[in-house]
Amino acid sequence: MTKSGIRLVLTTAAAIAVSAVVLALNFGTENAEPDGRIPVNLNETLTNELSDTSDLAGLDRKIKAYMAQWNIKGASLAIMRNDSLLYAKGYGWADKEKNTEMEPKHIMRVASVSKLITATGIMILQERGMLSLKDTVFGPGGILNNEEFTEAIKDRNYYKITVEDLLRHKGGFTGRAGDPMFSTRTIMLQNRLTKAPDHDELVKIILRRRLGFVPGTSQYYSNFGYLLLSMIIEKVSGESYEEFMQKNVLHPAGCRDMHIARNYYKEKYAGEVRYYLQANDEQVPEYNNSGRMVERCYGGNDITSLSGAGAWVTSVPELARFVASIDGKPNVPDIISPESVMAMTEWFDENTYSLGWNDTKPNGEWTRTGTLSGTSALIKTYPNGECWIMVMNTSTWKGPGQTRFTAGLFKTLRDSYSDKLPSRDFFYSTSRNEQRP
């Protein structure tokens, strides 16, 4: 072969290699926005180095000090402004035992942040005319009208529960007999079960109990209610909850690496972190009454069975992309209608949960929290268009109260560094996307 022929082969091979990399990192030009922006695969493109800048060195120090104060092994932070991803960086350890540092690509359990994802799935089904928030859940005319469910009901107030009641934690379920999603061992013993109940069996057991209040007349935070919403999605769509949500909610939002969590470290996904507990946390009996003693975050509870109440794992940049897809701002196309955005964020009063969100104040300050053993997550949007998201792979003795301190950290950081954030958008790959470090 001549020298010119060799050069042609090498040039062609290099071009093919570059094209392969581009295709791996981008979702493809067929998914380009009308203005030519091409969404990128966030978990493939983002690294800590992309967010390193001397202007934000103080921000890094404050985050590291916060982690040291609470003995947090690893954390991931994303910052958006008006749906542009300005900052994405990991801190500390994704897996200290394996010497793996936290990066934006690492995925983590986000606990009750999952409820925001589930609520979005419900809104999409309503937009498609497949259900209504006013539909009843149980009884002959309800969505979950399975004969075995109807036969289990003794309290006819169950027939009054609507989809919206579940979304707003007004279904009548209380913690009087414990949270069903975290009482598997007790439920097994009380019902003489030799294995952990599946969702259908658990629902039948709960339906035999009386409700704590008439649906719609009060509220009590209910993980079980969001399990029922997950089952409603399955019943109406004819697909598994995870499959429907990935195909109809997450992938359209540009989120490609979000999954239902598994229970044990040995089962973790590629790119998933290790979870850590507060110092001196003792081992607990395994959730399925096996007799084994386990780490609380790895078998103390059946995380997988939380489903849409608290089982999603995601990277923080992909979680930011999801939020950008349901917030009504124009830079990232929403996957739900403006009417659905308004319904999810409508504010009534301090004592009424929003749809999927914990709270959505009229000024644009919206909050979603999540806590499990080994996990703490917080999403905060602000009136100036910023959204700060942090997820940590460590739980503290404060439990759900830790998110209050993280919110305080956000305030401190925003006061000092909001005006120092660079102008760029990590969500897209385009020649017009300015990337100033």
Image (cartoon, grey):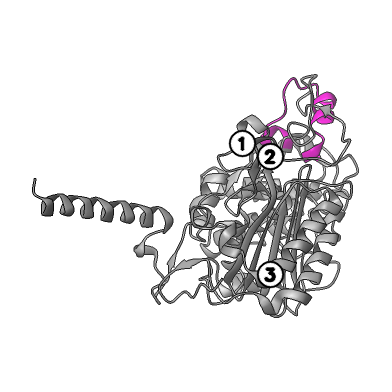
Q: Name the residue under label 3.
A: 56
Residue 296 pos. (x, y %): 80, 34
Q: Name the residue under label 2.
A: 274
**Considering only order in the chain, which callout, 1 or 3, is on the residue closer to the N terminus?**
3
Residue 110 part of the magenta segment: no
Residue 156 pos. (x, y %): 80, 47
Give left or right: position of 322 versus 91: left
**Viewer-nearest residue: 178 or 414:** 414
**Viewer-nearest residue: 163 or 158:** 163
Please determine whether, in this image, residue 100 is positioned above or below residue 328: above
Q: What element carries label 3?
A: helix
Region in magenta: 180-202
**Considering only order in the chain, which callout, 2 or 1, is on the residue closer to the N terminus?**
1
Residue 187 part of the magenta segment: yes
**Marks 3, 1: nearer the viewer:** 3
**Considering only order in the chain, which callout, 3 or 2, is on the residue closer to the N terminus?**
3
